[in-house]
Amino acid sequence: MAFPVPTPVGIFLAPDSLDQHMASISSASKATKTLNMIVDSWSKLNQAAANALASGDYTGAMSTYGDLVRLAEKQYEPTDPRVAASHQGLGEAYEGMGRYSDAEKHYRRALTVLERKLGTTHVMTLKATSALGAYYRRTGRLTQSEMLLSKAIHGLQSLPKCPSEDLAESMNQLAALFSELGRRSEAETLLHRVVALRDGTVSNDRSNSVQALIAFAEEQMKDRSYSEAELLFSEAAATAESSQGSAHPDTVTLLLKAGSAALNDCRHEDALPYLERAAKAARECYGEDDPEVAATLRMLGSVHVLLGSASQAADCFEAALKSAKKQFGERSIEAASDLHKLALVYSVPGTYAKAENCAKEALALREELLGKNHLDVIAVLKDLAEICAADGRNDEAEQYEARARAALGEAKSQTREETPADEPQK
């Protein structure tokens, strides 16, 4: 499973932060005109290289970072942080080009330079350690990755003033690694800590935390790890709800995603609470008759059907039908669809009459709007036949079956007539 990571532009030493760091060093000595020109030239090249890397121009970035390495090694001492930054950028460019052995060489060189200059516990060194660990994770060297990421996290936590975002990113990478190794509980624990860290460092804007959880959850969905995805979507929904309130589109969407993940795992009872909360939140957010509310109610109604709760399912589809008629018109495809669903819900002993009425309304609308030989019309005819048969009215059931067969024959005939002569008929 590939965990989504942003393009690591300046992953441990961004141009601005590097300039600030070097300014503090330069201020301790007399700055000459020549030195200022060199620093200015290096800064401009560094920014150009970072821009090329950010835009995906890895060849251009490689060329510029190569120039930066040569400039830094010529003008500064071998352990100068600018030498490390140039090697780091060159490693990122080579990785983008798929030249992994070259990338690793420069990543390792950047870390070595910083260890010699600043020591192993300096924040810049620890960020470089984390960057190399993240690279090893991306390239499948998971044992080395875990060792380096754990080392970086321990070191960052030990700093008097721990940089929360750097710590959060290292934990995020280690959580992805644990997920790939199947160590789910450890991954979840780290993700909770990432959320807590980012909540504390991004003021009231928790979008970074939510987006990280969503990205991880989407990857789990792709891998069909539905229970993991459900937990992550649920955590994202809780974070969104606490910062934006329940009556917010993001909260509604995330609750629906959590419910969908549970449904994909065939855990209908687990999906139900999410969808009930989503329906309530959607009503508060959009208003009773909004299409988003109707869509949520249809999903909730379908779960009630699967759980055998016919009464609750009928309530959901009745409310969705009311919304569809208001939004799209009494005689609309959307209304016909909800009527058909209601017919199926009512197809139980004691409510066959309601089922038949709904099905007949759906049939009339679909014949009017889609034509008598449309597959959706045929589907209603077949369901009407089943309703009548279940109610003991076999003659009427046979009539609907006959109409369905005739419509299906007409549909096939029309398809053959519309098929070009040089295209094989099915």
Image (cartoon, rainbow, N blue to C red):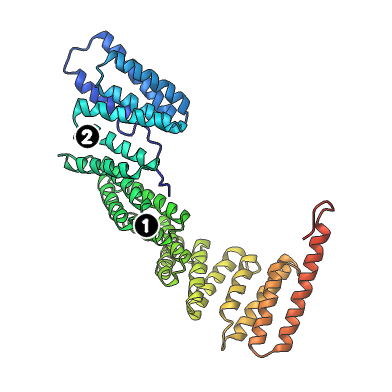
Q: Position of residue 246 (x, y in %)?
A: 37, 61
Please name the residue that numbered disc 2 is placed on. 123
Question: Which numbered disc flags the more N-terminal residue, 2 or 1?
Answer: 2
Does 233 sit left or right of 34 as displayed?
Answer: right
**Residue kind at label 2, given as amino acid type:** Val
User: Residue 320 occupies which quadrant of the picture?
Assistant: bottom right
**The furthest residue to the left:** 160
**The furthest residue to the bottom:** 392
Q: Position of residue 212 (x, y in %)?
A: 37, 48
Helix, strand or loop at label 1? It is helix
* The label number, if any, that marks residue 320 in the structure image: none
Q: Are marks 2 and 1 in contact (CB under 8 Å)?
A: no
**Residue kind at label 1, given as amino acid type:** Leu
Q: Position of residue 154 (x, y in %)?
A: 20, 43
Q: How many marks?
A: 2
Q: Residue at x 61, y 66 (%)?
A: 334
One can see residue 202 in this view: no
Where 363 sits versus 205, above or below? below
Where 300 sits versus 7, above or below? below
* The label number, if any, that marks residue 232 in the structure image: 1
Local packing at callout 1 (Cα closer than 10 Å; few below 14, some 14-19, many 20+) is many
Q: Residue at x 42, y 72 (%)?
A: 269
Q: Nearer the viewer, residue 325 or 151?
A: 151
Where 226 sits versus 128, above or below? below
Local packing at callout 2 (Cα closer than 10 Å; few below 14, some 14-19, many 20+) is many
Q: Position of residue 121 (x, y in %)?
A: 18, 35
Q: Mark 2 to mark 1: distance in Å?
A: 30 Å
On-image quarter of the C terminus? bottom right
Q: Nearer the viewer, residue 21 or 172?
A: 172
Q: Residue at x 35, y 16 (%)?
A: 70
Helix, strand or loop at label 2? It is helix
